[in-house]
Image: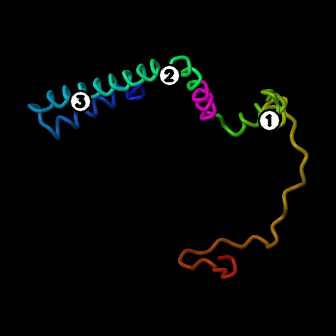
Amino acid sequence: MFANVGWGEMLLLVVIGLVVLGPERLPGAIRWTSNSLRQARDYISGATSQLREDLGPEFEDLRQPLSELQKLRGMTPRAALTKHLLDGDDSWISEAFQSPDKPGAEKPHSAPPPQPATPKSEPLTPGTPAPFDADAT
């Protein structure tokens, strides 16, 4: 349940609890919180086991689509396209989109960069307002 909460976060919660509740009520609050979490975990595991007993072999049939849905949750657009269109082979993608900085990668053939239509203007002197173009905004 709290698998991604580290010791630093726990220490921070204890310090905040110490400031808010005070040293005399903090142990009772920690005890109450841990008991509540334990009860909730017991209720959830009990409900799962009761559902498993009630459904019997159909419970596994229910788990299979849920596990497939969980797999789809972590799928990125690139992974989905690779899986369904390329049967999982993404070797040509990595070769086609290599950056030109890597050794052995060819530079793409492209047209020279376009030249600006207007000549470069001189920098403004301090205190002068910037030019305003009503059509650009």
**Disc 2 versus disc 3: distance between alpha carbons?**
33 Å
Q: Give the crowd class for mark 3: few <14, some 14-19, many >=20 residues within 10 Å.
A: few
Percent across and percent down for residue 115 are 84, 64
Q: Earlier in the sequence, mark 2 or mark 1?
A: 2
Region of the chain picked out in magenta, as a range: 64-74
The answer to whether the residues at label 2 and label 3 have Cβ atoms under 8 Å apart is no
In which quadrant will I find the C terminus? bottom right
Q: Earlier in the sequence, mark 2 or mark 3?
A: 3
Determine the residue positioned at 69% across, 81% down: 135
Residue 98, which numbered label? 1
Quadrant showing the N terminus = top left
Residue at 65% from the left image edge and 71% from the top image edge: 123
Q: Residue 37: horizontal and vertical position, in percent?
A: 29, 27
Q: Amino acid at mark 3?
A: Thr
Image-quadrant location for residue 29: top left
Quarter-wise, where is residue 47 in the image?
A: top left
Could you tell me residue 45's position as x and y percent? 38, 22
Name the kind of residue labelled 2 in the image: Leu
The vertical placement of 49 against 100, above or below, is: above
Vertical placement of 2 versus 129: above or below? above
Q: Position of residue 98 (x, y in %)?
A: 80, 35
Label 2 belongs to which residue? 55
Rate crowding at label 1 as few (under 14), some (14 to 19) or many (20 or more) other CA atoms within 10 Å: some
How many angstroms separate mark 2 from mark 1 (CA)? Answer: 52 Å
Q: Which residue is mark 3?
A: 33
As helix, strand or loop, the secondary structure at mark 3 comes to helix
Indicate left or right for 134 with 17 as reference.
Answer: right
3D distance between C-alphas at marks 3 and 1: 52 Å
| Residue situated in front as seen by the camera: 128 or 59 | 59
Q: Amino acid at mark 1?
A: Gln
Q: Is residue 92 left or right of residue 19?
A: right
3 vs 1, front mark: 3
